[in-house]
Amino acid sequence: MSYQDFLPTAYHILYNTIQSYPTIPLTDRSTGTETMADTSDGTGHRAIPQSPLANGGATMANMNGKRLPRPKRIPSISQDDENDGDGEASHDDHNGSSRSLDTTSTTSTAVHCSDTQRSFAMSHRILPVDASYGDSGIRPPRTSRRSARFSRTANRLTKSLSTPIMRTETALDEICRPERRSNRERYNARGRLDYFPLLSERRSLSPGTRDSAPFRIRDRRRPSRLARAGSRSFSLRDAADDGSKSGGEEHSHSGGNEELYDKMLASIAARFTRRATLPENIKPMQDDHESDIMDPNAMRYLPKILRDIYAQRQRRRPSQIGEARLASIDLRLRLQRPEHLPQDQDIRGSILILDLSGFTALGERLRMELGPRDGAAEFASRVNHTLSTMVRQVYKYWGDVLMFAGDALICLFEERDDGEIIWDEMGERTLNNEEKARRRVRECCLSVLGKIATETDFTIHGGAAHGTIRCFFLGTPSKIPGRCAFVVSGHPLKQTGQLLNKAGKGEVYIDGEDDPISQKEGVAFITQHECEDEEEDFDMSLTNVVPRESARLMEQEASLESIGEFEVNSHARAYLRTLAARRCDAGSQNAMSMLLNELRPVAIVFVGLHDLDDIDPRDSSLLQLMNEAFKILSRITQACNGAVRDMLFDDKGCVFISVFGAHSHEVNPCFDATVSAMRMESALKDLKLNRFSLGVSFGECFCGEVGPPVRSDYVVMGPEVNMAARLMGKAPNRGTLVSKRIFTHSKKFIRFIKSEEIQVKGKDGFFHAYIPQTRIERQSLEIAEPQQPFVIMPSRQNAMDSLMSVKERAQNREPTIAFVSGGPFLGKSRLIDEVATQASNDGFRVLKSFRTSLDSFTSYFPLRQIVSEAMITCANLKADGESTLDSEAAAANYLVNGNIFNKTDRVNIGSIVPSVADAQLLSLLSGLNPKARTRSIADSLMKILTLLQPLIIILEGDGDIDPSSWSLLAELMQRARVECPQIILIVSSRDSPTITSAAANLRRNAIQIKLMPFEKHETELYLRVMLGIKSNEVAIDPRLLDVVHDRSNGCPLFIDCVVKWAVEKQMIEYVDCVDGSKKMSLKMIDERSDDVTAAIPRELSSILLAPFNHLPPPLWDALKIASCIGYSFDAELYNSLNQVLDFMPKIRELAEKHECFESNGSHFRWKQQAVYEAVKSLLMVNQRQKIHRMIVRAFKDNKVDLESEDMKRGDVHRLLGRHCALAEDWNGAFEQYMHAGDRAKATFNFNEASKMYEEAIDFQAKMSEPPPLRSRIIPSINLGTCLRELARYKEAEAVLTRCLNEAQSVNSGVTLDEQLYVRALTALAALYQAQSKYAAARKLYEKAVPIAQNIQESKSSLWLAENIAGYAETLRKSGDLPQAESHHREALEIRTRAVEEKSCTELELAVSYTQLGCTLAGMRQYKEAYEQHRLALKLRYRYLDFAHGLVSESLNYCAESLCALGRGGEGIPLALHAVDIRKNVFGESHPAYAHALSVLASCYHAVGRSFDARDCLEKCLEICEIAFQKNHANLIPNLMNYGNVLRATGDLAKAREVYERAIAIHQLNFKEGQQANQLEKCRSEVSDLTEKLEHSVTLSSPPEQPAHGGIITLAPADIESDGTPVIVFTDIGRDVDDELALVLISSLRRIHILNPIAVIATLTPQRDRAYLARGSMDAVGMADVPVGIGSSGGLSEDMEVEVYDAEYSRASPCIYESGMDLVYKALESVPFKSAQLLCMASLTDVATLIREREELFTSKVKEVILMGGVVSLESETLTPDSAYNNNCDLASARFVYKKCQELRVPTATLSRWAAYGCPIPPKLLDDLSRTDHMVSSNIRSVSKLGVDHLWNKVILHPSDPRREMLPSRCDISWFCRVFMGKKDIIREWTSSVWSHVTKLNMYDPLAVLLCVPAYRSSHFSWQTKVVNETPHIVVGTSELDTGIPNRLSLYNEYSSLFFSAFLESLHK
């Protein structure tokens, strides 16, 4: 090797090597300038030589304080670019300016030169240095022009050697160029050179600048090439041997031996790395090393030989040897890499080819058995497994897999001296390197045969040969994948191919051996040598990167361990194939490799380069030809949208393979492949190749990665690959053959001719192939971009009309439902969207959601998005712009705070929208059956839906709607007629929806719409609109119509896709026909062809996916993951994929930039379902499994807190369980579905929970190993529990019985899972208890409880408390009350401790209080029972909504205990509220409602209202007879109560029958001794009743009936203990102050101040008023106060004044029909002059009393309190004014005033002025309603309506009859002054003014307070009028004299009494 060749290579390599050493350049930390360290003169500074290529410019100055100017330079040029640069380039200098680089000027550069450098130059025949010559110290000779040039070159070289900052590759290259060659010749030889700036030109950054790393200027058109100049050799040894081959002018070199070169390299490296002593303020610049490293993820796609050739030292790791030696090592590593291509190298070793037999047959068989996609997936999985096993064995025996050749591996076993001593079989000598390699090959073959022996689908055969192997390095040095190729050839490869053909199945032939290695020998070998798993056997260190020159490195006294680890230089990336490189792109690091595995239609091109089959590397022209062929074929492939697969030598010779459609979704890869083949054929002819052929085929192939992580490759497998190879073999010389499929898909664009009939292996019979000729020229077509319009086709007109009629119905307040069905892609969504748009324009709000088949397990899922949007919209409407609410939780909070929702509503809505639910209030759902829960949710929804009407709700999707949602929709639509009439419900689905029986009413008036595909004439109409054809003169060509209609199947969406694609491909043209007609036609390539449909692909998925061809791999991965997740998904649930795959940001990018998705908040869905289906179709079964495994792994790796309080976690469990199931991770699926079931069960969603548990049980059956007993039984127990809650008792009993039997049979041995056994026992016991099978339940509990008590860890657990309490309940219901009490107290103790430890909520403690209270009540310990129930009631008041079922339970039990204690009157308010709650929560047919009626009946009976009790009990028994089984034990208590009540009403015969039936039921349900007290009482009653009936028969008279038919009797009044007796006359129901007056009376009665002895309801309709008074008084604790029906109040009987409604207003037999009789009896019962008459209504009844019983009146009445007014106090007597009460019957009013004054009965008149003087704020009514009392809630509601109603009266004309009796003075001015405190007349309100009211006037409560002397004297002032020596007082005589001295004090007084009345009656 000449010095001229060697030195450039050394410098070329060293220029990059020195970058890693921090000695130079150096940055001054104080100034930020760069300096250069040097040791030659000790100054630390040196002049910097200029680049020789710059040839001059300004002389670079010393670094002391001056910035060096940048040298001018040439641009970098790439060898493979077709266009040359212009010789100039620009780059930015330090201040950002740009300057032109001139390459013409020349100058010399000053430099100091040391003696050492001079001697080096002299020894290498470089001219001497003259230190006296100028500043440079070098004087060139002046002999000749050539000598001068050489002198200058030498000087520059010497300066380069002296300066450790010389880093310019192009300068070294320029120095060593042959002198005689012209610039153009040198350019052609070297190609375009990259140019890197000198270190002196690095950017000088000021202190604090972020980046101080050097910058480089590179050609912007291509990445930089680091390897341009240098030797062809890989090592110094080879370089020396190859020196004679170097071109150019040769120069002799005296030191040509290897030792000299080694020493010289070490010397050069030492100079570059010599370290100087640095000043303290100098710091080294940072090194840029990462860009030179190949991505480790990409290394698996390269054979190990390439990794080792491109090895470089890991500079990040510390080393144990000096830097000078490291520089030498780096130089050696650089020298082993090929710098110029093409290159070749010969190595010694063995080639092994292992071929799988049965590959094609297996693929076809699986396709037939499993279908195309699943068969291909299974095929790929099996092949991958087998090939991976083979690869591991190759590397285990120190081999290397060079490439994956379809179903074969081509392997290399290189000779190497590993230092291991191996003896031959005789033990006589050691094996040499060749023998070692052969031995490794043999053992590898044996191992592979043994490993594959158990594989039934494949057999293996192979061949191996040893010798010299030629390695070719082709292409262009680069870092871009696909630019280079590594190819092996030689005699061993040919010989191996021959041996491969010779080998039979299960045989491998090795050259030099007569007999093949058989599979049997392989099995024996495996048995003898290997007993561990192959994964454990395989040593990954065998694949570590080890430099090819490692032995030479170790010769320099440096071991590999001391050097450190090695990595692969980035130039090796050029050898990656295009398809494999997509896996390791910088942008796809997060992409999962399996996401590119897919079954897809691809075209394959095989090119046989037969001229190169026997290439001789010594023939440089042939080698260059092969290189050019590779580059040209690669460029053509890429230009035609293809990918290079391989360039290899095999049994077919030298073959180039490319594929089309494997890396993009091209619509017609056949066309691209054919055009590529035609261009390749032409290019190869231009290269003067004499022998070549091409074959092209098309079909579905598996495209994806095979092989283990140690060595993988991206392959294209399938029969069509073999077909392309065989067509290549049959093709004529220098010709091309294509398959029929290629012809079919390309014949409209390319002309073909048929070949002669051929026959190929693997295909039966003869067939024609096709030879491409030329492309068909096509004219340009300009058609406007087709739009997707909304067009009403004839078949869609009826559908549109039907939907519009639905809208019109809703506008007319008639709610309607419409079902829209039809196949996929028929335009259902477009049709519905059009209707929704028009409805929105008409004022409708549109709420829309989408569902999929995956959502059918989740209750209410289809309504989730709708309810969420409804809540947010409603909250924002109420907020009225004050704030914007955009989250569900915020909206729910606002609605609760605004009293639109209550706590129960929030929990109900949380059943649909999990994020709204409050976990602490989930127990609100306890005790609700599905029907009651549906009604409760409907109640909550109606509160917001009514505010949003008119409303259209759209439910879209392809999945079924779950039963819970159907039931809720049915309930909503049924109630909508009254509450929300302007509502439309549209349900779309592919098939007619399956509606549950519970929702059957939805079909009654529903409109059914069925969409069908377009008829052909409709397709034509749609085509005309899309193409913009408006003139009828332009027709649609039948061929175009046929192909579009055929491909689209009449689907509008597919018509859009086909037409848009055809327009983009310029396949539609406008034609003027010969006959003068005009038409739009499909361009036909061959007019003689009748095959119209072949013009457009049948695979519409390709058309749909074509717009996404250019998506980068990460976005494709996101699309495929999304297709596996489903059509719609919640981003919040898949945030776990962000960390691993950056999933959601990519989804958002796809939505924003590529319009793949549309979003609504966190909910995403595919924009086009067709695209979703197309992407999903790309994935095979095993690929989908891998994706689902990846999703599961992402969730687990991110450690998502699935047990957090976020209620969406239930969805996460369900979805994660689905992913596990689809990944066939049955254990994971089981676990997740169990968690999902537990979540649903915890939220009392037993429907969903039961489905989850059923799925979990199914997954258990699929597990490879039987799960343990606990895992088998627990899901069944939970399922049985859910079925019990759903009242599916038979199913539950079957499940739980099976569980118990299994537990008993398995656990009969020693190992007993006691806790599991207890769970099985108690679950079945609870079921028996629910079925009233108490004996069976008790038997099970008796087994379970002792075991549970003995389990150590359960001593204080809630689990134990639950079991003990369940046992105690069974004991109680079976009659063993003492034991029940004992166990309940034990459970209560455990729960109390748990509350103190905060491991149990107080609500759970309330359960124990309740159960113990019921037990004590059964033991007649009523007082303590009441205390226990009251404790439970307080806790439930504290935590639960008043309307909750558990609150009603405690109310019931408290009322029952009070009744037993003789305090039935106190119990009635509690019982009434319990009845009301249970009616709303459970419904009127539920046993819970019946029980509440029974308790209320007992309370009524206790206060003497037996007939009321009878009515309640009859309703109760009616419910129980239906709800319970015949003769159920629960009927007995109700029958006993009924008999007792019947006896009180006098119906003795019926009472006896009832008791006798109770006895019969008792005997059927209880054994002797059980519930003995109950039985004894019944028998006693029967005996007593029988005696009385017989006595009445003897007397011949009916039994004595109770007086007044059960009406309340009046006892003599006790003024001392009960207070002042008062008789109240009220027109209750006209306004709320009358009812508030009764509330106030109840409070005063409770403190024994007033004693109401009668209440008379007057003013028509007086009966309804009596009912309201009765209900209101019952609710506030005055059930024992009689009510009578008074007169019409002076109004005519046919004129009825409005009475407001109340739920508690009801008819009662105890009401006195004659109110006057009640008044008389009441007065007769009181002492002389003790009673007060409180007149809060018309005075008609009082006048009647005085007229008919004047004496009684004067003797008993001590005072009459009148609410009205008097005309004047100035007259002699008081005369009533025109107040409403007076005005109703003015004659009676005057009579009463007159007689009271005559009879000397004092009166107290309260006028309206007093009421005006003490108004109440509306806030008081709001606060009172928060007591949850039914009366207070009704009063607040009615007050609002009353104020609005009064307003609507006062705005009428005084003469308007609709004003009723409203005085004319009550006008608008009066209203504003009285209710708003405004003097101005306000006219801006029309219907409702409640929100503007500031005060309300309450007359009647003031009148009540006026009855009490203490309150009268404290809070009122009055004027007295004495008539007949009798004082008559008037409170409030004018607006100025209101009679209220201190309004605040009075307000506080009566407001506290109001609160006391409500709270005391509820025992709060």
Image (cartoon, rainbow, N blue to C red):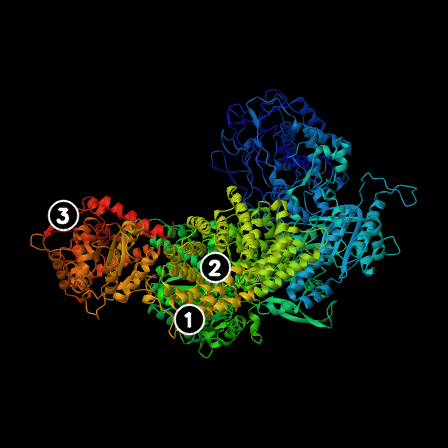
Q: Which residue is mark 2?
A: 928
Amino acid under label 3?
A: Asp
Question: Label 1, label 2: how many angstroms apart (C-alpha)?
Answer: 50 Å
Can you say whether 1963 is above or below 1292 in the image?
Answer: above
Q: Report which residue position mark 3 lands on.
A: 1937
Task: Residue type at mark 1: give it.
Answer: His
Q: Which residue is mark 1?
A: 1591
Within 10 Å of disc 1 (Cα), the crowding (few <14, some 14-19, many 20+) is some
Residue situated in front as seen by the camera: 231 or 580: 580
- Residue 716 seen in render: no
The x and y percentages for residue 842 are 33, 65
Q: Quadrant of the N terminus?
A: top right
Q: Position of residue 1722 (x, y in %)?
A: 25, 59
Coordinates of residue 694 in the picture (x, y in percent):
68, 62
Measure the alpha-carbon separation of dots 3 and 2: 58 Å
Q: Amino acid at mark 2?
A: Leu
The kind of secondary structure element at disc 2 is: loop
Check if mark 1's residue and mark 2's residue have beta carbons within 8 Å: no
Q: How many C-alpha atoms fall within 10 Å of the one at disc 2: few (<14), some, or many (≥20)?
A: some
Q: Residue 1360 or 1097: which is nearer the viewer?
A: 1360
* Mark 3 or mark 2: whose residue is earlier in sequence: 2
| Residue 528 vs residue 1556, the one in the foreground | 1556
